[in-house]
Image (cartoon, rainbow, N blue to C red):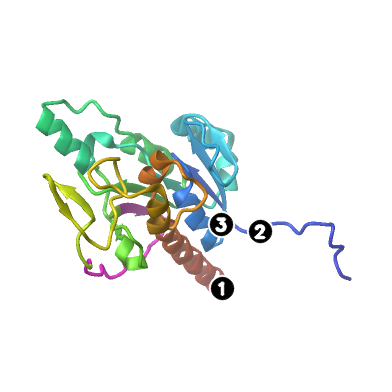
Amino acid sequence: MTQPTHIRREDRRPLLLDLFSCAGGAATGYARAGFRVHGCDIADRPNYPFPYHRGDALTYVAHLITTGEIRRYAFVHASPPCQAKNTLTVGTNRSRGWGGTHVDLVAPTRALLDRSGLPYVIEQPNGQAEIRKDLTLCGEMFGLGVIRHRNFEVSGCTIIQPVHVPHRGRVRGYRHGRFYDGPYVAAYGNGGGKPTVPELQAAMGITWTNVREELTEAIPPAYTEHIGRAYLAATTRLEMAA
């Protein structure tokens, strides 16, 4: 018997929790890979393209663990703030004589995710953040207009490291008063020959927000689509072998 068209079939895609979700760069990649996504961010994110909880991410995930609601999820992605050990922040602080007063939420995030019992990734930019670099992704691996290296600590699953393709040139912009051209745009900051918002959108593969701050904080969806597809393929193989 054919199911009536007005009755929606149950969405059986696995559910992913996106912590410190910002505007949804990571979330969109996972959705393209085959997940449903719920986000959580302490800031108002009207451009986030999926359901999300506004609040402190650590408080929220602790609540989900305590109530058992965390079991709704199959996987967790977290991009906790760690400006204290980000390469750009460290360099700026040292040059200006500042102390390391920025927030670092990597360790408490990891502790909660370990308690959850779920597979997860913790994402961080290049720098001194204390995560295992189980996976490093770069825009050139996916034919993007940014380099934007990102490191991922992977727990509870294995994601194969793609070959790091050589860069084709420089990042466009000014360095110490001299302008350099190149095939990549700088996805951070405002001055120094930085790209326009449309250039950033095209380079990152992000179309649903035109807020520069959200674009410069985001990771390209291609990164998490790679992670999500690899995880789901491995899960399917395990289920078929059981």
Q: Which residue is mark 3?
A: 35
Q: Amino acid at mark 2?
A: Arg
Which element is circle 3 on? Answer: loop
Q: Main secondary structure of the magenta part?
A: loop
For the N terminus, give its image quadrant.
Answer: bottom right
Residue 186 shown left or right of residue 112 in the figure: left
Asked if residue 165 is among those painted magenta in the image, a careful observer would answer: yes
**Which label was assigned to residue 86?**
none
How far from the left and from the top, in percent, is residue 59?
A: 47, 29
How far from the left and from the top, in percent, is residue 108?
A: 35, 34
Q: Which residue is mark 1?
A: 240
Which element is circle 2 on? Answer: loop
* Residue in the picture at 23% in, 41% down: 86
Between marks 1 and 2, how big is the CA–CA gap? 17 Å
Residue 61 shown left or right of residue 11 in the figure: left
Q: Amino acid at mark 3?
A: Phe
Mark toward the viewer: 3 or 1: 3
Mark toward the viewer: 3 or 2: 3
For the C terminus, give its image quadrant.
Answer: bottom right
* Residue in the picture at 26% in, 29% down: 102
How packed is label 1: few (under 14 Cα within 10 Å), some, or many (20 or more)? few
Mark toward the viewer: 1 or 2: 2
How far from the left and from the top, in percent, is residue 147?
A: 28, 58
**Is 83 or 106 nearer to us in this picture?**
83
How far from the left and from the top, in percent, is residue 75?
A: 49, 52
Which range is magenta? 151-167
Q: Amino acid at mark 1?
A: Met
Q: Which residue is mark 2?
A: 12
